[in-house]
Image (cartoon, grey):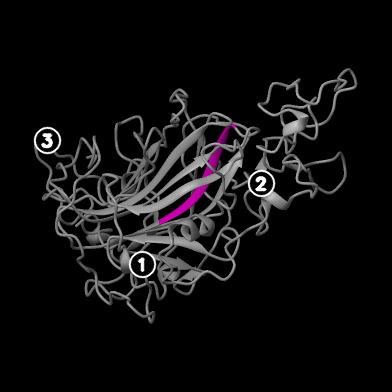
Amino acid sequence: MRATAWLVGGVAYAVLSGACSSTANTGFTGIGTDAGASTDSGQSRPDGSIGPGNGDSGGLKSPTGDTGAGTTSSCVVTDQNADMDHDGWSPAQGDCDDCDPNINPGAIDVLHKSDGGAPYWGDEDCSGKAGDSAMPCDQGLALADVNAMDAAKAIELCATATATDKKYGVISAAYVRANGAPFATPGLQVGIEPQFGSNVHVQAGQNMLVLSSGAARYVGQTGACNGISCKYNATATPPAGFPDPDPTCPPVPSIADDVALQVQVRVPTNATGFTFNFKFHSFEYPDWVCANNGYNDQFVAGNISFDSQHHPVGVNIGYFTACDPNTPARFAANCTSSATVTCPTRPASYCPDGVAPLLNTGFDQWNHDGADGATAWLESAAPAKPGTIITLQFTIWDAGNGEYDSTVLIDNFQWNASGGTVSTQPVAAPK
């Protein structure tokens, strides 16, 4: 009856829960990599400033908008087979500026800022065309597309690579179960959408990825659940350490209806981290917050993510902003405090976005008790070691049983030049 989504395989895991307390201070942890990078902390930015924005996607942007790329006057390339800037590429291998480690065929184009002028794209990938590696690639994708490489495109992971060519990009992509086992037929649990309902729109490009413990469809679409519970996999095996309970709420007993997108990708040589946007919907909210039976939907995108009070990221951090403000009695209605359970207090600002973001998503009308809940668009960031191969796994599952489904929207994956510190923040202004 609860759901989870995550990034796996030596990478970060962030948890978004469908039920627990209302603490507002929490964040995602950072990531390690398959190549042995340390588990540094990642950063999410409240203003959505990482990446080029305005519908572009995939490029690299440093906090200042410039990575400092450019040939230094004291550098003279004398050997086409030498790697003078120690970036892993020689001129003979395609490095068009062997004096700058930020420029080589394994890099991604950067959006630069000039003093008083308009931003401009660089040609850090040595393709001969500025900004080409930053263009979106999710045009023309179909709702029922179950090709995992197309799912990667839907979140702006556009470039492809091989395990040996040293270029950045997606090496492999597959739909899997929560524990990483192959999943050949994800069916209606996945979808590629240009919008979700009437008022939820993409954050970059033309499409976004939707994963659901029910059906990844909204009202009126073929295959829509038309109810709060569509069941697919009665039993499932969670990854090690999950399902991750809130220590002040009842433990999660089991998981079901799991599906995941797993992507192996090489990090650009001029990137030190990444960001992505996500939006979580759950039929659990607000009634099943910290429920007595341990039901606790979660979105997980990394190996551990707790706030200072050791609460998983989710409903307990107060980011469920879309719901019916006229139903305060529903909040945590199925929670009873005890020696081991502390029921949360209803947020002071309850349902500040109202039901408008839920319109025609199904979360506004399929529950006979009334509209359920969703977060705002959130952005998380984590560090990554330049040039290494990392594995990202976005997973969603029901917890407890296959009822009260949850759905996550994922979009606008961007590489960036600073890992930062752990935090999770709403995107300032939905696009």
Q: Earlier in the sequence, mark 1 or mark 2?
A: 2
Q: Tell me the CA gap for discs 1 and 2.
A: 28 Å
Q: Main secondary structure of the magenta part?
A: strand
Range of residues picked out in magenta: 272-279
Residue position marked by numbered label 3 in the rendering: 340
Q: Nearer the viewer, residue 414 or 151?
A: 151
- Which dot, 1 or 3, sits closer to the camera? 1
Q: Residue at x 58, y 31 (%)?
A: 387
Q: Residues within 10 Å of mark 1 (few under 14, many from 20)?
A: many
Instruction: Say which quarter of the image contains residue 76.
Output: top right
Q: Amino acid at mark 1?
A: Ala
Compared with 152, 122 (above or below) is above
Q: Earlier in the sequence, mark 2 or mark 3?
A: 2
SS category of the residue bearing label 3? loop
Residue position marked by numbered label 1 in the rendering: 216
Specify the quadrant that holds the N terminus.
bottom left
Specify the quadrant that holds the C terminus.
bottom right
Left or right of 70 on screen, residue 366: left
> Would you say the residues marked 1 and 2 are in contact, meaning their CB atoms lie under 8 Å apart?
no
Q: Which mark is residue 59?
A: 2
